[in-house]
Image: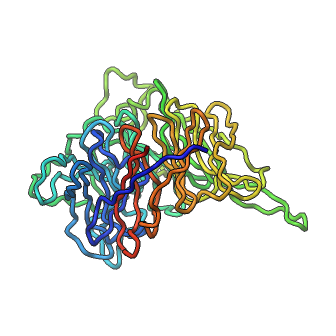
Amino acid sequence: MRGLQAQVRQRTFGDYGHFLNHRQTLSHCGRYLVYDTRNADPDISKTTRIESLDLLDDTVSILYDTHSQSIHGPGVGAAVCHPLRSTVVFIHGLTHCDELQPYAMTRRFGACIHVEPSNRDSGPRGKLTAIESRSLQPEIPWGVLGGGTHAHSFSSDGRWISFTYNDALAPEHRTVGIAIVDRWDSDADQVPELQVRKFEEEFQGIGWAAVILVPDQTIESAREECWLPHPTLRQLAFVGRIPIRTANPTQNPQERWIDEVFVAQLPEQADRWPRLLDPPLPDPQIPASQRANAQRANARVSSPPGIQVRRLTHTESAVHPGVQGPRHWLMASNCGSWIYTLMKDPQGTVRMVRVSVQDGQWEWISKNQESITHAPAIDSSTGRISYLTGKRLTILDTTTGQEMDVAWDSDAMDAIIGPVQFLSGSQGIFWNAKPFGSRWLQIWTAHLQ
């Protein structure tokens, strides 16, 4: 196994947390990292700021601040960068939060700001808008949600966003959804720049949103999704939890749940859903037979017509069935033919596998003898994947199958949090870790040689 050298460099030093999202935290120009100021994953409710780090000179800029110190919210976190423009999307709690109505998984939304990090004034900038519209009415129109979104992710063209969703009426059933945004510079309410906009129980967003599927007895929940690159199709892979029947030693059947890989394919007309489904005015270009009714009786949120959901993996006969290991999101190859995830081998070791999008066949691609302990990350331009076994970092080349250990100063770091991700140019990496002896989560980078 060939090795790589990495010169470790700490990039932030403030006495507060610097929490990177698990993907899409690098700006489209490759110069800035965007993050929130959590010091631990569960701390979104009491986190107030979204910041950026200039990788050229280590300048830290505040992109957005809630100016609220309440432990009950609203809270911000999990920032992602648009792939083609200076736009950032992140989780934002509803703006009226208190002890009785705190930040919660159904009381949050995808917030959007347009930023220019190179404009280095000391204060926050960017007018906040919501991606999705929100309503708690018994019947809501197409394109509107009635719960909370998180874990947002952009498609490669930046027009679509995927997310995980919890509806207010059934918060325990997690699913995945999508939003399409045609104009990032639109603001339906035309809020003056100095006016603080409220995002309470109901508001209008700039996007058209829907869920991919409604959880039921077949798929109990859906989560940890990723977009599959394709020249013509819109496809979203996700982890779905399904029931299987097993026999215990007394031969009495028992039901348990396992996580399998699924793919949802959006129909060709998905780009026209905002007009096809519940159009505000009849479009003469669309035949009346293709238009859908605005209100769906007895349904708060349902899936748009035409989505095809296909189960890829069938691992129920394995010794350790289903997706396993630390919490992680699915990753796709640049060609769209493979999905990468983690499973346990027969010895119980968490390893990397790739799943064929065509037929669901899967195979081990990492050779680690100890279990992978952190979420992996992929460099979509080269197909390389990083994974950690404790503090040991390995780079896996998915095109050749070659694995390379990275020699780095792991003693400088007390705890590594989350994945090790790739910088632009394919030679650099970045990650979150606490310096040895410090309580604060910082951002680190290294150049691979």
Closer to us: 299 or 271: 271
Residue 285 position (above or below residue 54): above
Residue 223 lies left or right of residue 128; in this view the side is right
Residue 349 lies left or right of residue 221; in this view the side is: right
- Expressed as whole percent of the image width and height from the top left, the position of residue 319 reads 78, 55
Choose top left, top right, bottom left or bottom right for residue 19: bottom left
Which quadrant of the figure has residue 123?
bottom left
Query: From the viewer's perspective, is residue 105 above or below residue 26?
Result: below
Toward the bottom, the furthest residue is: 99
190 or 53, nearer to the observer: 53
> Can you give x and y, in whole percent of width and height, for residue 389 in the image?
58, 58
Query: Is residue 441 shown left or right of residue 342?
Result: left
Residue 188 in the figure: left or right of residue 438: left
Residue at horizontal 36%, vertical 67%?
441
- Write the residue at 25% across / 63% down: 49
The residue sitting at 33% across, 74% down in the picture is 72
Q: Nearer the viewer, residue 420 or 342?
A: 420
Q: Is residue 1 visible?
A: yes
Residue 274, position as x, y percentages in the image: 35, 35
Q: Nearer the viewer, residue 248 or 22?
A: 22
The N terminus sits in image quarter = top right
* Position of the C terminus by quadrant: top left
The outermost residue toward the right is: 250
Note whether residue 295 is visible.
Answer: no
Which residue: 45% across, 25% down?
Answer: 289
- The location of residue 241, given as percent across then percent down, is 63, 54
Counting labels gives: 0
> What sort of colour scheme is used for the picture?
rainbow
